[in-house]
Amino acid sequence: MTVFPIMPARVSRLYELAYNLWWSWHPEARALYSTLDPTLWEQVGHNPVRFLSEVQPRYLEEAAHDETYTQQYDSITGDFDRYMHPGPGETWFSRTYPELTDCTIAYFSAEFGLHEALPIYSGGLGILAGDHCKETSDLGLPFVGVGFLYPQGYFRQSITRDGVQEAFYDKLLFSEAPATPACGPDGHEVLIGVDLPGRRIHAKVWKVQVGRIP
């Protein structure tokens, strides 16, 4: 469970923005976090969820009373609201295929390269899948991505002074990821079961919001 500092009401939507990867392709949204504490922003790997759990409360208070910051905050949250709630015919898909807006496209991929804050990808195909999600969000397609939220398996690489390649395996902490448990209509977290020979396995469903795309 992530523990966040008390957020001043004036900038409280920083939480909401952190859990929508819309910020990953909008640098002005990322700047709302990085300008608060540039050093910490680098230390947490540009992850706004983890950033908000570690940032000093005084930086949030200062931002809430800084006219330049709050003007930028208002501008970005306004852009975000207009993006998330387009009017009829304001997206490419709704203009081009209005008769299909009630349909849903399911996109299955073993990996999604959305941002370094969510290390569930290893290469080009993952990046391609992530870009598909971002583009379909911009186009307004009725689209949902389905994949795996791997807790471990990917690694970072570095080269030593002797030219030796080293691998560092990091475990994904769900509490620090821009992901939330998926809930059903009854408000309970969603679990799925799969029957295998001699046993039944269960998996918890998580939701990663990518602009308009879950």
Image (tube, grey):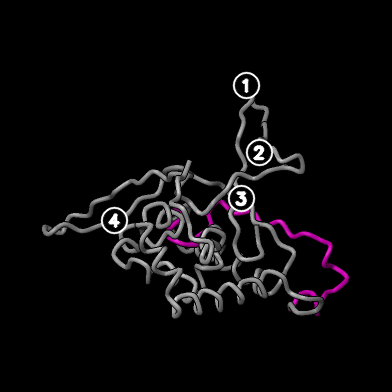
Which residue has dot 3 on it?
Answer: 207
Label 3 to label 2: alpha-carbon separation: 11 Å
Disc 3 to disc 4, how far (Cα)?
28 Å
Q: Is residue 194 above or below residue 157?
A: above
Residue at 60% across, 37% down:
204
- Nearer the viewer's eye, disc 1 or disc 3? 3
Q: Which residues are magenta?
A: 92-119
In the image, residue 123 lies in the stretch drawn in magenta? no
Q: Which residue is mark 2?
A: 189
Residue 208 image point, x, y percent: 58, 54
Residue at numbered disc 4: 157
- Callout 4, which amino acid? Gln
How far apart are the alpha carbons under marks 1 and 2? 22 Å
Point out residue 28 in the picture as x, y percentages from the top left corner.
48, 76
Pointer 1: what residue?
199
Residue 156 is left or right of residue 2, and the answer is left
